[in-house]
Image (cartoon, helix red, strand yellow):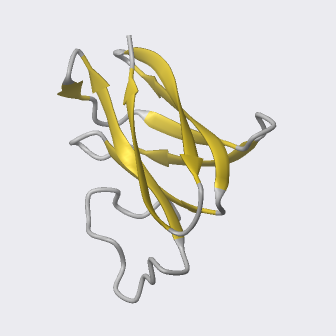
């Protein structure tokens, strides 16, 4: 069985934030975390790139290239999206509100 890594755990050992771009955040509805949401990463042209399932605390994470990204969440609580610009390596955060 394959699947996305647990989104609630810390970054993997050896992650070099001087070289790697990490897009992370959480899915919320009314300020409360939404676990189990499908979180999709779309590139600057709107093309699907990756998908993970948010942790019980609504957390998600993607390793990506610098650029402009759309993070879209689909859940029982509703759908939502956020734009995220990663101008270089490091951790870049977004909160996706669903309704």
Residue sitting at x 53%, y 64%: 2
Q: Residue at x 39, y 18 (%)?
A: 98
In-front residue for pair 1/86: 86
Q: Is residue 63 above or below residue 18?
A: above
> In the figure, is residue 45 to the left or right of 74?
right
Query: Taking the image as drawn, is residue 97 in sight?
Result: yes
Judge left or right: residue 48 versus residue 45.
left
Residue 14 % position (x, y): 40, 89
Residue 69 placement (x, y as % from top left): 63, 42
Query: Please, which residue is most extreme toward the front here?
Result: 87
Q: Quadrant of the C terminus?
A: top left
Asked whether, in this view, residue 41 is left or right of residue 27, the answer is right
Note whether 12 is above or below 46 in the view shown.
below
Q: Quadrant of residue 27?
A: top left
Considering every residue shown, the one lying at the far bottom of the view is: 14
Q: Quick one: 59 or 17, which is closer to the camera?
A: 17
* Residue 25 position in % (x across, y down): 36, 45
Residue 30, percent from left and from top: 22, 15
**In the depicted structure, whether residue 97 falls above or below residue 71:** above
Q: From the viewer's perspective, tell me whether residue 78 is left or right of residue 56.
A: right
Number of marks present in the image shown: 0
Q: Is residue 46 above or below residue 6?
A: above
The residue located at (54%, 74%) in the rendering is 20
Residue 1 visible in the picture: no
Residue at image point 20% right, 22% down: 31
Please identify the quarter of the rendering in which residue 53 is found.
top left
């Amino acid at each position: 069985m394959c699947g996305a890594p647990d989104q609630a755990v810390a970054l993997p050992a050896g992650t070099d934030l001087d070289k790697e771009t990490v897009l992370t955040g959480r899915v919320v509805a009314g300020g409360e975390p939404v676990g189990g949401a499908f979180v999709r990463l779309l590139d600057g042209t709107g093309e699907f790139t990756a998908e993970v399932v948010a942790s019980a605390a609504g957390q998600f994470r993607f390793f990506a290239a610098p650029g402009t990204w759309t993070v879209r969440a689909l859940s029982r609580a509703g759908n939502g999206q956020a734009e995220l610009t990663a101008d270089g390596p490091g951790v870049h955060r977004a909160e996706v509100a669903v309704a």
